[in-house]
């Protein structure tokens, strides 16, 4: 069933109207909560007449994208008059493969404090930043789409999303389970699920060795600002010099139902 998307503001406005008027007749509207991929300004609710199952995209950009509701519960709100809702245009996809084109519209961005799911995040320069927590990854669902600083996401680049670090910047990510470390370019916002500290690209997850598992415990450390132009030699050279790099061959992607299977994990 097609699902229209409306601003989360609507989920507060419509209940207020229904409660104020005390009306129980008319059109019933079911609203289910859903988190946007990575941009905190893109908070939506799904509009449908039945509950809609959510998905935790490995880019829970989750998404990312990234705090996600696995099985939303529909709230039926009676309204006495037709409501015209215009669904926003889906975010377009762009061609990838040309690094210059992918970063043509990139900007340096820190950003203002913002709120997602009741939690406040304050972007800032933090040269001594270090954190330990869960990393997840995101891939095809966001491939070719804009990141928070205007770049085009390419799942084969060594990139990542972080809630507060400046965009773009370099961080090192170490998989505690196997000791592998990569340097990734932070160019997006998220993740917002509790306990997660970073979302990495599909390629970074391949190199770190957790693409099948979906998530892993990592140590993240700020390295420095990243360039705006078409230059990824720093992160690529670092990865190629690792003793395990040749052994980290491409592995099959998880099954289609994998992302749904991990939604219960915070």
Image: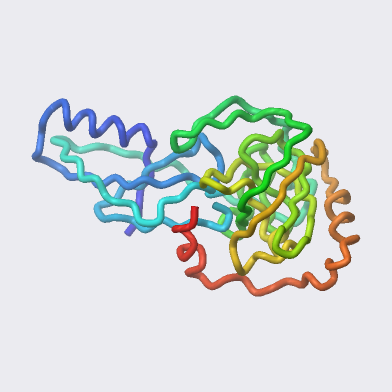
The percent coordinates of residue 158 (x first, y second) are 75, 54
Residue nearest the viewer, comparing 218 with 254:
218
Q: Image point 62% across, 46% down: which residue?
A: 197
Count the marks: how many? Answer: 0
Which quadrant of the view contains residue 130? Answer: top right
The percent coordinates of residue 153 (x first, y second) are 67, 50
Residue 58 visible somewhere in the drawing: yes
Q: Looking at the image, is 15 positioned above or below residue 58?
A: above
Q: Tell me if 236 is positioned left or right of 34 in this view.
A: right
Q: Tell me if 201 is positioned left or right of 92 in this view.
A: right
Viewport quadrant of the N terminus: bottom left
Q: Tell me if 246 is positioned left or right of 73 in this view.
A: right
Q: How is the image coloured?
A: rainbow
The percent coordinates of residue 29 (x first, y second) are 22, 44
Residue 64 visible somewhere in the drawing: no
The percent coordinates of residue 145 (x first, y second) are 61, 49
Residue nearest the viewer, comparing 77 with 193:
193
Q: Image point 72% across, 33% down: which residue?
A: 107
Residue nearest the viewer, comparing 202 with 123:
123
Q: Image point 71% across, 36% down: which residue?
A: 167
Q: Looking at the image, is 261 positioned above or below residue 100?
A: below
């Amino acid at each position: 069933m097609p699902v229209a998307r409306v601003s989360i503001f609507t989920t507060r406005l419509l209940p207020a109207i229904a409660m104020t008027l005390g009306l129980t007749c008319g059109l019933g509207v079911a609203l289910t909560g859903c988190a946007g991929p990575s941009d905190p300004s893109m908070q939506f609710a799904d509009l449908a007449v039945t509950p809609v199952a959510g998905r935790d995209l490995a880019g829970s950009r989750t998404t990312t994208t990234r705090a996600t509701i696995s099985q939303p519960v529909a709230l039926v709100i009676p309204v006495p008059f037709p409501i015209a809702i215009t669904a926003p245009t889906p975010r377009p996809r762009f061609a990838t493969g040309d690094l210059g084109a992918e970063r043509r519209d990139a900007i340096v961005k820190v950003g203002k404090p913002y709120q997602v799911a009741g939690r406040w995040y304050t972007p800032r320069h933090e040269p001594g930043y270090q954190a330990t927590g869960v990393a997840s990854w995101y891939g095809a669902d966001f491939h070719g789409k804009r990141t928070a600083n205007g770049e085009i996401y390419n799942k084969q680049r060594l990139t990542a999303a972080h809630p507060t670090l400046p965009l773009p910047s370099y961080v090192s990510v170490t998989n505690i389970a196997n000791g592998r470390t990569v340097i990734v370019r932070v160019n997006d916002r998220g993740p917002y699920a509790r306990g997660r500290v970073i979302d990495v690209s599909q390629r970074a997850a391949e190199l770190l060795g957790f693409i099948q598992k979906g998530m892993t415990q990592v140590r993240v450390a700020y390295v420095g600002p990243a360039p705006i132009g078409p230059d990824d030699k720093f992160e690529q050279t670092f990865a190629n010099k690792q003793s395990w790099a040749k052994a980290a061959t491409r592995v099959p992607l998880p099954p289609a139902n994998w992302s749904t299977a991990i939604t219960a994990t915070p």
